[in-house]
Image: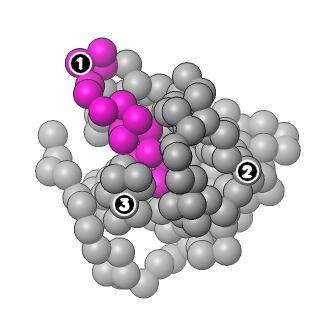
Amino acid sequence: HFGLLVGETAGLDTLRKLGDEMRKSPTIRSALELLQDGYSSFDRGGVLDISFGLETVGVRYVLIDPQVTSASHLGDMVASAACGILQDLCGPEWSASAIHLPRRRPVDETPYRKRFNCALTFNHLATAIHFPASWMGRPVHSPIEGCRAGFAPEDG
């Protein structure tokens, strides 16, 4: 579960300038639209797709770089990081309703169940996080500056 541990340190600060712009958004939906529009400049190894349904929002990450090794770790990290980013945007009461991971079911699911605390399935083609669409009209949460420390890749 190495990818989970790396992803736990991520939040809006990980996205640098994009995260700063997302913080300024009036609603969660507008912040996620910024993320979807700007993510390709941040990550060239995968594609982010956000579907805004009437009842559910789906955040999906598809790995497109065939040279990536340890794809299961990357899927775990993306799911864990995305949950941290969504909690920064929505506040600590946010949680996913379901998460799909592109990896084999691990022998010990405990770290996954503990991190995500929602319906969890394995053996999917892409990483996907689903949560209620009722979050979309809410204002962006203002987290205490510096409350998340951790991995922050360089720009470019």
Q: First in sequence: mark 2 or mark 3? A: 3
Residue 141 tag number: none
**Could one spot residue 83 in this view of the protein?**
no
- Image coords of residue 53 (percent x, y): 78, 37
Task: Tell me if I can see residue 96 in this picture.
Answer: yes
Q: CA distance from mark 1 to mark 3?
A: 23 Å
Kind of residue sitting beneath label 1: Gln
- Amino acid tagged 3: Leu
Q: Secondary structure at mark 3?
A: helix
Query: What residue is at 36 percent from the left and 41 percent from the top?
Result: 73
63 is higher (above) or lower (below) than 41: above
Magenta range: 65-83
Name the foreground residue: 52 vs 100: 100
Residue 17 occupies quadrant: bottom left
Kindly identify the residue that appears in the image at 71 percent across and 38 percent down: 52
Question: Which residue is under mark 2?
Answer: 119
Determine if the magenta segment contains residue 76.
yes
Mark toward the start of the polypeptide (1 vs 3)? 3
Q: Nearer the viewer, residue 20 or 123?
A: 123
Badge 3 density bin: few <14, some 14–19, many ≥20, Cα 10 Å: some
Colour pattern: one colour
Residue 149 rendering spot, x and y as whole percentages = 28, 74
Q: Which residue is mark 1?
A: 67
70 in the magenta segment: yes
In this rendering, the answer to whether 74 lies above or below 96 is above
Quadrant in which the C terminus appears: top left
Mark 2 belongs to which amino acid? Ala
How would you rate the neighbour count of disc 1 (Cα within 10 Å): few for under 14, some for 14-19, many for 20 or more?
Answer: few
* Residue under pointer 3: 5
Please tell me which of labels 1 and 2 falls first in the chain.
Answer: 1
Asked whether, in this view, residue 123 is left or right of residue 8, the answer is right
Which is nearer the eye, 94 or 136? Answer: 94
